[in-house]
Image: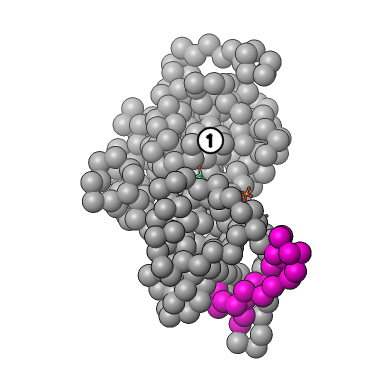
Amino acid sequence: MYKSIVIGTGPSGLTAAIYLARANLKPLVIEGLEPGGQLTTTTEVENFPGFPQGIMGPELMDNMRKQAERFGAEFRSGWVEEVDFSKRPFSVKVTGQEDALQAETVIISTGASARYLGIPGEQDNVGRGVSTCATCDGFFFRGKKIIVVGGGDSAMEEASFLTRFASEVTLVHRRDELRASKIMQDRARENEKVKWALNRTPLEVVTDDKGVKGLKVRNNESGQEELIEANGVFVAIGHTPNTKFLGGQIKTDDHGYIVVKPGTTETNVPGVFACGDVQDTKYRQAITAAGSGCMAAMDCEKFLEGAMVHDWSETLDQ
Ligand code: NAP
């Protein structure tokens, strides 16, 4: 039996693992299908303190993993199918393993996954012209036309990044106002290769015998349908928290984000903690995720020492 199992290996899970391992609690860390989390699909991270020249996302995550290993964290690959938090010790069932793992405490740091538009032609062409990861797939579109869908920081970042490869990047957004921060908007606007197709609702990814041909959109001003031609469509419309495997045992909000007691990482089940994007609807930054991972490890230690008073009344009243 483990003192603590950490589910997920983004900045929050790995920071929790570093702190737990350093406190000699020998955590087991479960890596899912996307080891390292969203940062492994990012290019340069410029705002993580300590790297004045920036650092590539995958390198940052690799460093964090090595740091956790150095202090004795154990890693296992697998997909957590289900958990049982109704009795102690807690059980965590990982795919391909007959016996469920057992732990006194669990830290949930499963992050959030890229969302898709849900339009015809999209899923059939994932990996064949449709992508949610500019870093992974931008290279395949050298000298070609690309569309990025979305109006947030991710869309601005991907559009700017993809101009390194593409001859032209058209940013398609369903409203005429962007959600992205000013600095990210300005950066994309200053880039001559970025064209703008605002107030357009995506309707269909259109293909021909050579692959993706473009995106059919509705011009919300005129009501007319238009085809924006491109060889690749990058969908950058946000993320969904990975909480399905919890089977409703942990309190979540209407969008599936875990609810924690304000100012802590405590969930509604004593001994189960949540950190990172899976419980963060507001900040969602690598550094805030890492900070909450540290909090989760410290909350976990306190719980294991028997020093935690679990009082959820204020949270449940909200
Ligand atoms: P986001 O801020 O939630 O933006 C998602 C965008 O996609 C919105 O513009 C939204 O349109 C659009 N959208 C959502 N569903 C859609 C649909 N079905 N069809 C068409 N468009 C749709 O997500 P994000 O850009 O991934 O950013 C998430 C968080 O990470 C933010 O806090 C952001 O600041 C942060 N982030 C920071 C950086 C950075 O600082 N380097 C980089 C990336 C992300 P509406 O605007 O109409 O709702």
Part of the protein shown in magenta: 211-232
Task: Give the residue displayed 57% in from the left and 26% down from the top.
Answer: 260
**Hey, which quadrant is residue 237 in on the image?**
bottom right
Please identify the residue farthest to the left as the structure is shown.
52
Relative vertical location of residue 84 with respect to residue 153 in this rendering, above or below: above
In magenta stretch: residue 217: yes
Number of residues whose C-alpha sits closer than 10 Å to that of mark 1, classed few (under 14), some (14–19) or many (20 or more): few
Asked if the residue at label 1 sits under 8 Å from ligand 1, the reply is yes
Please identify the residue farthest to the front as the structure is shown.
222
Towards the viewer: 309 or 145: 145
Task: Give the residue displayed 66% in from the left and 80% down from the top.
Answer: 207
Task: Kindly report the secondary structure that dominates the magenta region of the rendered protein.
Answer: strand
Q: Which residue position is annotated with label 1?
A: 282
In magenta stretch: residue 297: no
- List x then y, in percent, for residue 227: 67, 75
- List x then y, in percent, for residue 99: 60, 44
